[in-house]
Image (tube, rainbow, N blue to C red):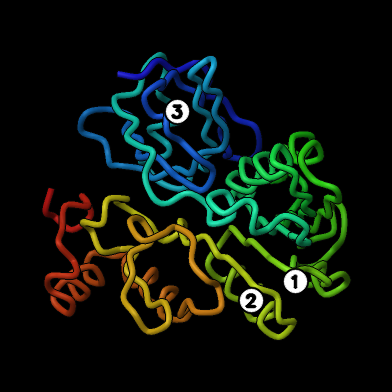
Amino acid sequence: MYKILKNKPIGDHIYLLEVKAPLVIKNALPGQFVIVMAKSDSERIPLTIYDYDKDTSILSMIYQVVGSSTLELSKTENEIFSVAGPLGKPSEVVTNIDKYKGQKIIMIGGGVGIAPVYPQAKYFKNHGLDVDIIYGAKNKDLLIILDKLKEVCNNLTIVTDDGSYGMKGLVTDALKEKHDYDLCIVMGSTVMMKFVCNLTKELNIKTIASMNPIMVDGTGMCGACRLLVNNEVKFACVDGPEFDGHLVDFDAAIKRMNLYKDEEGRRYLKDLEGESHSGGCGNCGDK
């Protein structure tokens, strides 16, 4: 069991969860994620690491209530059953920090996808890299951690669909206005990342996309995050979550996500892919 220090709303259906997890934090690096289970019989929820403090052993995560599992998590008090991790590979920039010194870096976060932007930007700043951030949301009520973001970047551009805060439009509109960057790191909805990667390809900006939105089980067993990268089969949870955004087949990933939402679609994928969908995700009747 893991002691809950904080589990409170910080936005519209968006929660900050803090727990004591010394073993997880010991080897954690920005870009990685954890698997959280509210109770022993709960679904596994993959959550990217928002922040961590190795002195206090406090692990911070941000999640949005979008279904029964996250709703259950939002109502959990005192302790949660399990926090497994760190999982996935750390950010490419984090593990090759010297290679990127002196480069102009733009980080783009959409919706709750801004949460994993923060730890990377914080790490970059602490290691001598300067970054700008573009943060997009549907409206001002969905904006979070603005003060934290301002602390770790040179320039923060806010974009909302309805213009209720900052620039009205899309994150791609903001990128078009200032696009003299060497590297783009994008995190958010799969559709948003697709259009960012299409634009950065035109602008000849190297782009890293975090494919954590397509993860379900987080251990490679369920097959939900199976995707094509340069026409090779990869799994976001074990091979990523970060990939070269210009090599990801976003159309295939989006189609797969839509199929995976219902039971018939999951059976279809299991029959179609056989061994590449090994079960155990809790969503296919194979717990």
| Kind of residue at disc 1 | Thr
| Kind of residue at disc 2 | Phe
Q: Earlier in the sequence, mark 1 or mark 3?
A: 3
Determine the image quadrant of residue 253: bottom left
Q: Which residue is mark 1?
A: 172
Question: Residue at the front extreme?
Answer: 98
As measured in the structure, the alpha-carbon distance from the residue carrying label 1 to the one carrying label 3 is 34 Å
Q: Which residue is mark 3?
A: 25
State yes or no: discs 1 and 2 in contact (Cβ < 8 Å): yes
Residue at x 83%, y 50% (from the top left corner): 156
Q: Is residue 167 left or right of residue 60?
A: right
Q: Position of residue 187 (x, y in %)?
A: 59, 58
Question: Please, is residue 186 above or below residue 18 in the view?
Answer: below
Any part of residue 33 in sight: yes
Secondary structure under the numbered disc 2 in the rendered image:
helix
Q: Earlier in the sequence, mark 1 or mark 2?
A: 1
Disc nearest the viewer among 2 and 3: 3
| Kind of residue at disc 3 | Ile
State yes or no: discs 1 and 3 in contact (Cβ < 8 Å): no
Question: Please, is residue 62 above or below residue 167 in the view?
Answer: above
Q: Nearer the viewer, residue 260 or 232?
A: 232
Residue at x 23%, y 64% (from the top left corner): 263
Q: Is residue 200 left or right of residue 225?
A: right
Residue at x 36%, y 43% (from the top left corner): 45
How many residues crowd mark 1 within 10 Å: few (<14), some (14–19), many (20+)?
many
Q: Which residue is mark 2?
A: 195
